[in-house]
Image: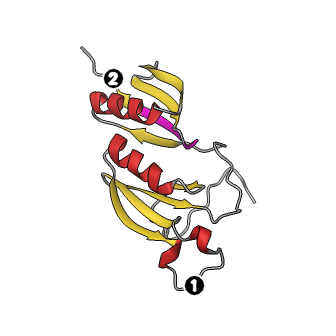
Amino acid sequence: MNLGTPLRPKHMSIQAIIPYLNFDGEADEAMTLYVEALGAKKGQVMHFSDLPEHPFGDAANSRVMHAELELGALRLMVSDLPPGMPLHRGGNQSVMLRWSDLEAMKRAFQALGEGGKITMDLHAAFWGDTFGTLSDRFGVQWMFACPTPTA
């Protein structure tokens, strides 16, 4: 295989890349934060109790099996893991949010940072954006970027 030549399928069947965030019984609370801080809109929400049968016991019934949030034209999917399944917070993924309104970005950054950890304050980055990073109180890593207005 020649690694220098990208694979080019005759047609692209991938329609979207959608971040999917997992929680340990906190998905409803996380969605509330994302609705309030980011202006997301809740779409479909299904709990384990909505299934005709599931093998996870009554402790899973109130957990979110699958949910969708809409952020403008973007989609974010959310779920709780079944009880007993380990959740590894943080890791090697981040959700990048590209903004067009700097003031709205600042408000959302502060709201998501409450109870979490701001890992890089919002600042004028050398490439022309205002940029910052944080982990919210659920351990989800977020990156914020907005073109810095020029005077």
Residue at (29, 35) in percent of width and height: 100
Q: Quick one: 101 or 1, which is closer to the camera?
A: 101
Residue at (49, 35) in percent of width and height: 143
Residue 75, position as x, y percentages in the image: 40, 57
Q: What amino acid type is highlighted by mark number 2?
A: Thr
> Which residue in the rendered view is the most extreme toward the right?
1
Task: Quadrant for the N terminus, please.
Answer: bottom right
> Which residue in the rendered view is the most extreme toward the bottom?
52
Q: Tell me how far mark 2 sits from mark 1, CA to CA.
A: 51 Å
Residue at (53, 23) in percent of width and height: 120
Rendered image quadrant of residue 127: top left
Whether residue 101 is situated above or below residue 58 in the rendered picture: above
Q: Quick one: 63 or 21, which is closer to the camera?
A: 63
Q: What amino acid type is highlighted by mark number 1?
A: Glu
Residue at (55, 67) in percent of width and height: 9
Contact between labelled residues 1 and 2, with CB atoms less than 8 Å apart:
no
Look at the image and give the residue range highlighted in magenta: 138-144
Which residue has dot 2 on it?
148
Which residue has dot 1 on it?
53
Rendered image quadrant of residue 36: top left
> Which residue in the rendered view is the most extreme toward the top?
151
User: Is residue 2 covered in magenta?
Assistant: no
Residue 84, position as x, y percentages in the image: 71, 62
> Which mark is first along the chain, 1 or 2?
1
Residue 109, position as x, y percentages in the image: 40, 32
Query: As drawn, is 146 to the left or to the right of 151?
Result: right
Query: As drawn, is 2 to the left or to the right of 135?
Result: right
